[in-house]
Image (spheres, rainbow, N blue to C red):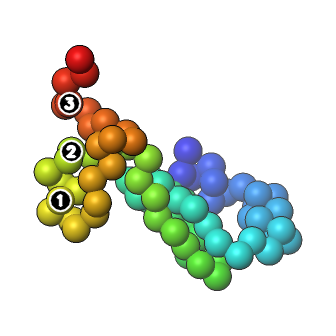
Amino acid sequence: MCRRMFEDHELHEMLKNKRFDVVLSETFDFCGLYLADYLEMPALISVYTGSRLNALTNALGEPSIIHYFPGTYIRHN
């Protein structure tokens, strides 16, 4: 998949011609990160689309969103 993105020159031209202000890319899929750099996009926001363990969010200093989006290992009653 990553190779196809880099070999698809039509995709490159289309993305450059659209003149996007920002690229959103999945943190653990490096293809999007590399493609944004390769195409010299002006800004990049790396996003994580999975659920995190509540203990990890505390360690990272992020507020707990447990009342909005329960973690993977939380029991539901």
Residue 73 drawn at (x, y percent): 19, 31
Q: Position of residue 11 (x, y in %)?
A: 76, 58
User: Which of the 4 quarters of the picture holds residue 10?
Assistant: bottom right
Q: Residues within 10 Å of mark 2 (few under 14, many from 20)?
A: some
Q: Is any atom of residue 13 visible in this view?
A: no
Q: What residue is shown at x 18% (from left), y 54% (from top)?
A: 56
Whether pointer 2 and pointer 3 mark residues with C-beta atoms closer than 8 Å, the reply is: no
Q: How far across and down, in percent of the image, does residue 54 sit?
A: 20, 47
Residue visible at 39% across and 42% down in the picture: 68
Residue lying at 14% horizontally and 51% vertically, measured from the top left:
55
Which of pointers 2 and 3 indicates the residue nearer the eye? Answer: 3
Please name the residue that numbered disc 3 is placed on: 74
Relative to 50, say whether 23 is above or below.
below
Disc 1 marks which residue? 58
Q: Is residue 57 left or right of residue 26?
A: left
For badge 2, the amino acid type reads Leu
Residue for badge 2: 53
Q: Earlier in the sequence, mark 1 or mark 3?
A: 1
Q: Nearer the viewer, residue 29 or 26?
A: 26
**Secondary element at image label 2:** loop
Residue that lies at the very extreme toward the top in this rendered image: 77
**With respect to residue 22, does 75 lie above or below?**
above
Horizontal side of residue 60 vs 24, given as left or right: left
Residue 9 seen from this side: yes
Residues at badges 1 and 3 in contact (C-beta under 8 Å)?
Answer: no
